[in-house]
Amino acid sequence: MRNKLDPHQVAHCGPCDQTTPRCAAISFAWCGCVIACYNRINLTKVNAGQDPLEEDGTVENETVFLSRVTRVKHLKIAVAVLGLFASTASFADQGDIIARVRAISIRPDVHTSGTLSALATSVNEATVPEIDFTYMVRKHIGVELILGTSRHKVTSNAGSLGGLSVLPPTLTAQWHFNPDGRVRPYVGAGINYSWFYNDKLTYGGEGVGVKHSSFGPALQIGVDVQVSKRIFVNLDLKKLWMRTDPTLGGASLGTLKIDPWVIGVGVGTTF
């Protein structure tokens, strides 16, 4: 559901009790006009052969002039920053669905126990595509479902142990800051269910079994940056906790905790 522009909010330019994105947008435009007029006055003086330092026949102190220039530069910077966060319409409102497509780099933070530690067992990184959908329960609150799968090589000091695929659908509850702005940070926390499949692990010519599923927490932080009317760019960082318990001939080899960091870059839109 999109917010409609309220003409009364736009037309009101007196003192108000709070600052809204619409007020910010109006201020942004007003400041731009001030800067343009200031530059135009000085340009007119130069074209007329008059020193821009002169005002009513008086030459200002150079320090005062430089101070004015500095203030204008600061004003321009403030306007630029304000422009990033100002908007006249809500990016996503209650009932909207946000869809993203990302390329993610999965970087395991491996911890082991038992025989796996003695073998210095490790899991390699992987880069894969991922899709996710966020349903906005409220303007600031969303629920995100993350879908993707990856294939990893498992290594040890005895050489390669084979490959293992992981499917970790992850559900997080998110808090969206600044939902009306062009730059929209968010944080999230939830749970992931990891399914280990297509496991082709061997050691000493004998097959290694794995526990095929695990539950673990998930944390998330990210930001969406609007680049056009419908498209935004997304940066996202997650921490997932997942584990499995390999066995050899029915005997435990210890616990393999993969616990990856997941770094994502992608694009998205809102429905």
Image (spheres, grey):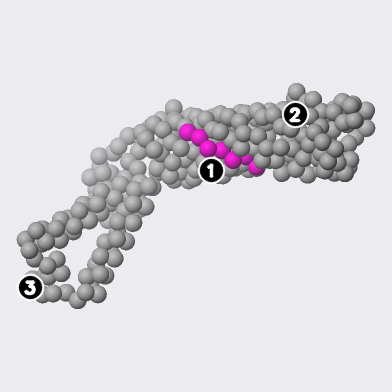
For disc 1, the marked residue is: 222
Q: What is the secondary structure assignment of the residue under circle 1?
A: strand
Q: Nearer the viewer, residue 53 or 143?
A: 53
Q: Amino acid at mark 2?
A: Leu
How far from the left and from the top, in percent, is residue 233? 46, 37
- Could you tell me which residue is drawn at 74 percent across and 32 percent down? 153
In this rendering, the label closer to the viewer, 1 or 3? 3
Q: Is residue 97 left or right of residue 198?
A: left
For disc 2, the marked residue is: 164
Sequence-first tag of 1 and 2: 2
- Could you tell me which residue is drawn at 75 percent across and 29 percent down? 164
Q: Amino acid at mark 1?
A: Gly
- Could you tell me which residue is drawn at 75 percent across and 25 percent down? 197
Q: Is residue 177 left or right of residue 28?
A: right
Q: Amino acid at mark 3?
A: Gly
How far from the left and from the top, in percent, is residue 183? 43, 44
Q: Residues within 10 Å of mark 1 (few under 14, many from 20)?
A: some
Q: Residues within 10 Å of mark 2 (few under 14, many from 20)?
A: some
How far from the left and from the top, in percent, is residue 139? 46, 38
Please indicate, yes or no, whether residue 140 appears anywhere in the rendered image.
no
How far from the left and from the top, in percent, is residue 241? 71, 40
Which residue is the extreme one toward the bottom? 61
What's drawn in magenta, residue-wise? 261-267
For disc 3, the marked residue is: 57
